[in-house]
Image: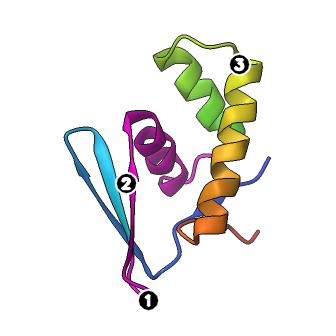
Amino acid sequence: MSEYRLPSHVRYRVVADEAVVLRLTEGKVLGLNWTGTRIFELFHRGASQQEVVEQLSQEVEAEPEELAADIAAFAEELLAAGVLEVASS
């Protein structure tokens, strides 16, 4: 599974368990709820999709298969929004 990183033009701040993500080049802001923030932070720390699934399965009540699908879909949304990119090997 893929590993991700934040592009150099992205900054974020966590406030009360929710993140505000800013794309500096466009001035666009994205708000993330607790779950989205947790996933985003794990990706930022270098976790792979599988590692995020494993970590979240310990923190929330959900089937690992469902988590894997949801996390993959969310990663695609973050990629499309330009606030995450695939880390080069």
- Which residue, given by chain and number where applicable, does mark 2 sit on? 31
The residue pinned by badge 3 equals 64
Secondary element under disc 1, as helix, strand or loop, is loop
Q: Please say which color scheme the image uses.
A: rainbow
Q: Which label sits in the foreground, 3 or 2?
A: 2
The percent position of residue 64, horizontal first and vertical second, equals 71, 18
Quadrant that contains the C terminus: bottom right
Q: Residue at x 72, y 31 (%)?
A: 68
Vertical order, 84 against 53 (above or below): below
Q: What stretch is highlighted in magenta?
A: 23-48
The location of residue 83, given as percent across then percent down, is: 53, 68
Q: Earlier in the sequence, mark 2 or mark 1?
A: 1
> Mark 1 = which residue?
25
Rendering quarter of residue 63: top right
Q: What residue type is labelled 1?
A: Thr
Amino acid type, mark 3: Pro
Left-right relation of 43 to 85:
left
Q: Is residue 57 above or below residue 14?
A: above
Q: Do the residues labelled 3 and 2 touch (CB within 8 Å)?
A: no
Which residue is more in the foreground, 50 or 64?
A: 64
Task: Specify whether residue 76 is in view.
Answer: yes
Q: How far apart are marks 3 and 2 (CA)?
A: 25 Å
Q: Can residue 87 be found in the magenta stretch?
A: no
Q: What residue is at 57 percent from the left and 64 percent from the top?
A: 5
